[in-house]
Amino acid sequence: MSQILGLAILFLLLNLVAGLWRVARGPTGADRMLAALLFGSTTVAVLLIMAEWMAMPALRSVALLFVMLASIVTIAFFGLPTGDDER
Amino acid sequence: MVISVLIDFLLAAGMVVLALQVVSDKAVLRSIILFVVFGLVMALAWTRLHAPDLALAEAAIGAGVTGALMMMAWRRLLIINPERPADTPLGRSRLAVPVALLSAVLVATIGLTALDVESPTHTAGQVAAEEMTATGLGNPVTGVLLLFRNLDTLLEMAVLLIALLGARAISPPASPEEAAVVETGTPLVGALLAILVPLSILIATHLLLAGTHEPGGAFQAGAVLAAGGVALILSARLKPGERPGIVMQLGVTVGLIAFVAIGVGIMALGETLLVLPGTWAVYLIETAMMVSIGLTLALLFAGAPALVGRRG
């Protein structure tokens, strides 16, 4: 079981690496922001599996915070000037 | 075994790559977003180091305050100079390579020296861990912060207050329009806030109460409260005010006041300075600290001496 959980975490982390490509390429700021939000969701998944894998229930609180606070960066991003690309 | 090594390697390599990207990227917005992502990976790294308290703090401050703060700072830069001065890359200083090499030598020297040092058999950490059962606190981090090293924590609260005063001294007052990015009439924002703000108060209270027996505590709880405040400021529900009223002044200082009052007041009973009389004192001080930390962070975010509610 522990093996499977570890493999799941590894898979999710590799997803993060793949998602970095989208953050780097863009092309618009909104694409990068959406990729970052996807990272947030994936991190929450990793944290929830880690809570089980490392037997640290407190990690669920960390996951809870990320879920709750992801919207704040989005609101802040909303106010930024939009455009084709910020180079 | 192999899997955990692979996970740790991915996290460590990811942090180095992200950190390099954050400081070297020419596009400011991309740097900011990468910094937010760096915060996520950092929280995972703290988790792997068995430090859930730090992961909580990273989550609360990184996701709730700093990302939004940097985006606001960039927005203000654009308002000041629409020519995007921040995007013009500075040439690399001639000192960059020598300084980097010297730092590398320093780190390598310290690292190699540390390898030779025998690990001490009797450390303060061990003593603290042994005494922890006598304190009635289940979370060793809270025990160290509030009981064993509480002078440090007290001074940290003072530093936070000084940071606020310093920021107020050098920054011009922000106009009420500058802090908000979302007009009050924007659809869905009201519904989001109706969930987010009560939830932030609820979770802050949970973290505060949990802090005595599991990871959590005043700093994390305060940061979560501040995140709720940041959401209200961004959506123009709270606006920067000119003059702090008595409530605002009391809120910013109540952590320090409660800590000093109990820590010094205990001397009247013949105890030593800052020896807290029991778990109730820990709860009381933590609650006061949470209020001060949350309010101070929100005020620093707004760049204003006070916050006032939207009229009407």
Image (cartoon, coloured by chain):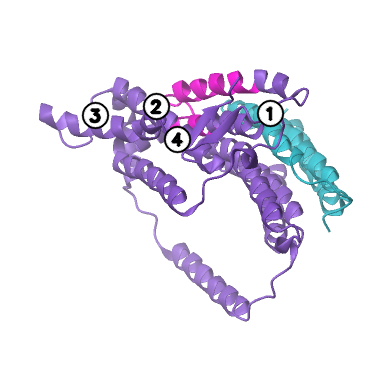
Chain colours: A cyan, B purple
Instruction: Kindly indicate whether the residue at mark 1 contacts the one at mark 3 (C-beta within 8 angstroms).
Output: no
Chain bearing tag 4 is B
Report the residue marked by disc 4.
B293
Image side of residue B205 versus residue A45, left or right: left
Which residue reaches farthest front? Answer: B312
Q: Nearer the viewer, residue B185 or B193?
A: B185
Q: Nearer the viewer, residue B202 or B279?
A: B202
- The residue sitting at 53% across, 69% down in the picture is B108
Tag of residue B247: 2
- Is residue B210 on the magenta stretch? yes
Report the residue marked by disc 3.
B262
Question: Could you tell me the amino acid type at mark 3?
Answer: Ile
**Element at label 2:** helix
Give the dominant element type of the magenta stretch: helix, strand or loop: helix
Report the residue marked by disc 1.
A67
Stretch of the chain drawn in magenta: B196-223
Q: Earlier in the sequence, mark 3 or mark 4?
A: 3
Question: Could you tell me the amino acid type at mark 4?
Answer: Ile
